[in-house]
Amino acid sequence: MLSNLTQVQISGFIALLVSTPFLIKSVRNLYLASASKKWTKLNGTIIEMSNIGRRYNLKYEYTINRTTYKSHRICFTNSNRRINQSVSEFMEKYAVNRIVDVFYNPIKPKQAVLEPGKKDGLMLAIIMLSVLFIFGCLAVFNQAFFLELINPYFEIQ
């Protein structure tokens, strides 16, 4: 079966294998980011905070009906990088033992964020992954059209 595939089809199959899980995760995160704007708000406490370059490691806890939950999610993005915030601003905002607003999913209380509705980079990721997914589908299932589409730019035969 695999021996009958062309290099273009194999490349398309690899593109599909790589893009599909990331595309699904990005669409899921976009949905959850939008949904989190309507979640229940309560107080929580930062219990751990460390910074490595532009990345962070943060944990907080919150209590619902005498059950304490722990989470690390600040918002639903595909990265744990601070965007448009200096290190000092970020470290001050999320200092250990600081009381913060936690927004949790009333249906699934383990699911919580500190910054509801934030979608940093999700739309760009979805667009780029969708293009890769579409090109992968074309390369695998309609190689002639795929080659016709990209040949003026790359001259693939």
Image (tube, rainbow, N blue to C red):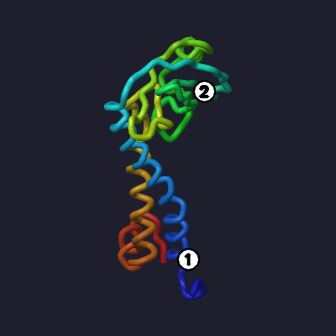
Going from N to C along the chain, the mark reached first, 2 or 1, is 1
Identify the residue shown where x is 47% and y is 32%. Answer: 112
| Residue, disc 1 | 7
C-alpha gap between disc 2 and disc 1: 46 Å
Closer to the camera, 89 or 151? Answer: 89
Q: Position of residue 81 (x, y in %)?
A: 55, 31
Identify the residue shown where x is 47% and y is 37%. Answer: 111
Which class describes the residues within 10 Å of circle 1: few (<14), some (14-19), or many (20+)?
few
How many marks the image carries: the answer is 2
Instruction: Tell me the element at label 1.
Output: helix
| Residue, disc 2 | 59
Q: With 41 as the anchor, is 51 left or right in this view? A: right
Identify the residue shown where x is 53% and y is 29%. Answer: 67
Tell me: residue 24, above or below residue 85.
Answer: below
> What amino acid is found at the position of numbered circle 1 in the picture?
Gln
Q: Position of residue 48 (x, y in %)?
A: 65, 22
Closer to the camera, 108 or 101? Answer: 108
Q: With 55 as the anchor, is 26 left or right in this view? A: left
> What amino acid is found at the position of numbered circle 2 in the picture?
Lys
Instruction: Tell me the element at label 2.
Output: strand
Closer to the camera, 15 or 91? Answer: 91
Which class describes the residues within 10 Å of circle 2: few (<14), some (14-19), or many (20+)?
some
Check the picture and name the quadrant holding the N terminus: bottom right
Q: Which mark is residue 111?
A: none
Q: With 118 as the anchor, is 97 left or right in this view? A: right
